[in-house]
Image: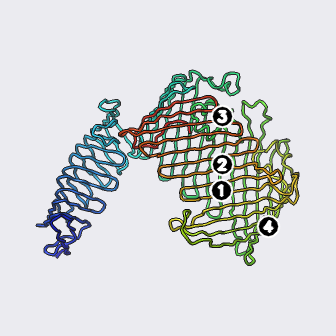
Amino acid sequence: MLKSRRLVGLLFWGSLLSFAGASDFDLPDEPFDIRAGRMEYVDGTLVASGGVTGRFENVMIRADRIRGNPETGDLHAEGDILFERGNMLWQGSELDYNFIKQDGLFGPSSLYFEPAFMSVDHVERVSTNEYLLRGATFTTCPKDHPHISAHAKEARLIGEKYIQAKGVTFYVGKVPVMYVPFWRHTLSENMFTFNFGIGSEWGTYLQTKTTVPITENVNSITDVNLYSHRGVGLGQGFAWEYPKAVGAFAAFYLKDEDPHSRYDLLDPIGQQIGDDRYRFKLEHIQNFTDTHYLNTKWNYLSDPAILEEFFKSEYRNNAQPENYASWVYGNSYVGSEVFVNKRLNDFYENTDRVEYSADLYRTRLGNSPFFLQSENAIAHLERVHSSTNTLAGNAYDSVRIDSANALYLPQRYGFLNLVPRATYRATYYSKTGGGSEEFRQIPGAGMEVSFQATKILSEQEHWYGKGLRHKIEPYADYIYENTSISANRLFPVDGFDDVDTLKDENKVQIGLRNVLQTQRDGRLARFIDLDLYTYYLVEKNGASNDLDLLYIDARMPLTKRTMVDLEGKYDWYAGKISYFNTRISYDHDDLIFSLEHLYEESARSLWTPRIDLFPTGNTSVEVYGRYDDNDNDLQEVALVGYKNFCCMRYGLGYHYYDDGEQRIMFSIGLSAFPEARISSGF
């Protein structure tokens, strides 16, 4: 006898019946649940009608009528059918489906996989993660007559993530604009981006970007950029993403019709520019384990101005692109790295470096109370100057072997923490600026002293969180180091890096750290973390005062959405701030705001605000600016507005740069991909 289930009766007004069992007949114990206005079970067949809702493992089906065999899993649904599985939504009038095998035949259908709508003549589920679609139309527009659509004779929906199709025709309205024999596309990614406008340097321009998946993990990215003043720019790239690897390659070429519009031939930079403008860029990260990975980035450019003129956002972030490869391997005790940095273009300054480092993290020595930390590196270093720098001195190079070691003896006396240490650093140079080899030794000693005290200030819930605890940590750190060779005997200016600038030290760092903690979402969170410290100079070593600057370092997550970061230096004796950097950010669904102020005495006072208003809404606005009030210089300002109309997203913007360049920009994209924005350079 099969395990019994019971049918629960329902009143006339049609609250749904629960198919949980039967008192007058038996049903097999299968992983499903059906609710309906009327149900019958005869000869192993279930017949349900009147607003049927069925759940079959990870599938939900609504229909006017469902007939099926619970033992074999075969179902036949009719009427107004709604089929849901994960993020797939299917509508149709007839369905044959096996909920055990999870396959079936779908008649003429409408499917929705966010953000894509599909109208299909015939659907067949051929496996648990693949649908066969015949006579399919794809669009992100929910209207009956979409603005942009793709039509395919045959397609496969794989993993509910991407489409693989044959014989695809793309339409704008009812007009066919492109045919491809094979097409593969990830549903969650934008395929086309169109930007056009007028610029003082480019003239009238049109920028197009097409992203086409080649495989499940690799995308092809093609750029065609038309500039009325400069010519035609072509770009081809590839982006890949695997479970343990991600990367991209991009190439760009332009036969420039006005290469000296910004820098003329009298300018050293202009002399480096020809008609052929190009760039190649490669980035890749390969993760073998969490502590074993390869990270590399390489850039090769035709001239020093191509980024500034055609890839301004990259230029603003990093005027000199990086070229390096880093291979890192480590565990909880040691870390090692092979690092290569090589200048590929001689119009840049650089320190070319081939280096191997091996570090021992602070580790207890056996069962003793001592801890050892060691940092070691061997490198070939070469300082090379820009070909445009006529005032630069001679290039210099050296093999450097450096080893920095510290022995710690942590102690605790009641509430007081004491950590005395002994240090020794040895550095060998095969060649210095004077041409001779040198061996530098820096013995040292020190003592860290600190304690902590805490107090509960509140247990109430306020705007910052629930409860407030104050933790205070006064600390002092005595630092003594005695170098055998002064830095100015090694290399001109600052050598290769900070290792070459080390000098005698005899000072005490004195600091006070304040931390305010609260609870957010049931977890302990920082509200304010403020560190104030300075150095008392036991030996001045050329300094004029006993105290160094006052250093300020604060990170303040005031709320879950609001962050404030501060770092600065205050000159006690002059009574003025020498450096201060403030960053404020607020992130909400309808408003993203950030403001950074960078102040350097007698150099700059740079304000950088940005506002994104309703970033994913039907109407959104972006505002960005850079203003230096030290020189009363408006360096950059941009204003862009977006408006969704039906399935399209239209953008209109203006961008001004302090070098006199101005652009008016207009873009058209799909509203399903609001992150595809005007290529305005910010």
For the N terminus, the quadrant is bottom left
Q: Position of residue 176 (x, y in %)?
A: 31, 30
Instruction: Read off the residue under disc 3.
Output: 345
- Amino acid residing under circle 4: Met
Task: Give the amino acid at mark 2.
Answer: Phe
Q: CA distance from mark 4 to mark 1?
A: 28 Å
Query: In the image, which disc is placed on residue 201?
Result: none
User: Crowding near pointer 4: few (<14 within 10 Å), some, many (20+)?
Assistant: some
**Tag 2 or tag 4, which sits nearer the N-term?**
2
Q: Secondary structure at mark 2?
A: strand
| Residue topped by disc 4 | 447
- Depth check: 343 or 622 in front? 622
Amino acid type, residue under disc 3 in the picture: Asn
Q: Which residue ends up furthest to the left in the rendered image?
A: 43
Element class at badge 4: strand
> Which color scheme does this rendered protein use?
rainbow
Q: Marks 3 and 1, Cα distance to the nearest angstrom?
A: 29 Å
| Amino acid type shown at disc 1 | Ser
Above or below, 529 against 602 in this view is below
The residue beneath circle 2 is 339
